[in-house]
Image (cartoon, helix red, strand yellow):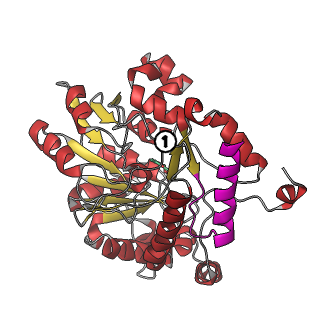
Amino acid sequence: MSSDDNQSPFLIFGAPQLDESDIEEVVACLRSGWLGTGPRVAQFERDFATFRRVQPSQVAAVNSCTAALHVSMLAAGIEPGSEVITTPLTFCATVNAILHAGHVPVLADVDPITQNIDPQAIEAAITPRTRAIVPVHFAGRPCEMDLIMAIARKHGLVVIEDCAHAVEAAFHGQPLGTFGDFGCFSFYVTKNVTTGEGGMILGRSEEQLARARILALHGMSKDAWHRFGDQGYKHYQVVESGFKYNMTDLQAAIGLHQLARVEKNWLRRQAIWQRYDEAFANLPITLPAPPDAAMRHGLHLYTVMIDVRRCGIGRDDFLDAMNGLRIGTGVHYLSIPEHAYYQQRFGWRPEQWPRAMRLGRETVSLPLSPALSDDDVARVIEAVRSILRA
Ligand SMILES: *Cc1c(COP(=O)(O)O)cnc(C)c1O
């Protein structure tokens, strides 16, 4: 490694693409004196509803996707102790939300090519206690929602889509998050739209969405915006034992202008994706499955598989080498049963879901932020090539 490499700036994985309009909106929010849940959250909800082509009464902004998953699962009215099927190749929050809602997570292995939950594995995991499926649109690639919804209808199951990677993705032209009973979105810093921390619940049923909204703000019948608005004081009733999951105007201010840039940022990620595809075509690594014509892929993560037998270097050594070249990477994800808590609580072993285990042990996510310059992308390409050539 040359000393130049040591001096080049660290390339942050998943850096947000922010511009002056975001900064000005945050400053305007601060100057307005209204930082809590208020007009900017309401605007963000309306804009998001338009963006996903649903009614404003079908969305509720919250403070994370984890919160969205939790209250969706409660609002769906599934009896506690039900089995909920999800993928082992996801962030722990997906499984934790199932546990928070008082249910029993059941894992169904992924397709080794798409890395999404395999509909056949879902069918095989169904028991008389199954009540719901939580598909995760991994890396922004839509799950096979036609097959999954057919399974759900056949067995009378609730579907809650984890759309954390897939804010702009669609399947056969239909926005993700609108297939299931609920769609849950994340605006965490690394996601395609960010509010620092934040999330959105999209509900097919306005009634269930209204319940999710109440659950997300202490179980109060009227939200603080109405209470503290200029319409005069409004009494509220607590109608459930709810949670403190509301989004604030300060968060909404960060995200408001990003919705208008979703397409531009997607095109930028697509250009980076194509450069990676071309640059890595001859390397002994497995590249992401190409999107097919039926989908708008969210292009959230560019994941490559480092198989030590083909590459001569293991995944973790590859991560260290990238870090040595001052390039941030990610691992999405070590499969859920690799973690101590789930092993101890459920007796799970990674080998029970061999495809997710293998992917989780080989996968590396390369930087794909639209904030990357062409030079940054060239640096990533050169780093990957040099490590694999060594
Ligand atoms: C980021 C993420 C979440 C959690 O989102 P938060 O907004 O951080 O709570 C859930 N599921 C998946 C697949 C994620 O990537």
- Residue 127 percent location from the top left of the image: 19, 24
Packing grade of label 1 (10 A; few <14, some 14-19, many >=20) is some
Q: Is 145 or 208 nearer to us in this picture?
A: 145
- Residue 63 percent location from the top left of the image: 50, 57
Q: Is residue 241 visible?
A: no
* x 61%, y 70%: residue: 371
Q: Is residue 323 left or right of residue 190?
A: right
Q: Residue 11 sits in which quadrant?
A: bottom right
Q: Is residue 314 left or right of residue 270?
A: right
Q: Which residues are magenta?
A: 366-390
Which element type, helix, strand or loop, lies under badge 1?
loop
Q: Is residue 307 visible?
A: yes
Q: Is residue 313 left or right of residue 195?
A: right
* x 56%, y 34%: residue: 310
Up the image or down, 6 lies above or below 249; here it is above
View extreme (right): residue: 3
Asked whether residue 389 is drawn in magenta, I would say yes
Q: Which residue is mark 1?
A: 91
Q: Is residue 124 left or right of residue 70?
A: left
* x 90%, y 55%: residue: 3
Confirm or reject: label 1 Cβ below 8 Å from ligand 1.
yes
- Residue 210 percent location from the top left of the image: 28, 59
Q: Quadrant of the C terminus?
A: top right
Q: Is 8 or 284 nearer to us in this picture?
A: 284
Q: Is 303 or 46 nearer to us in this picture?
A: 303
Q: Residue 318 sits in which quadrant?
A: top right
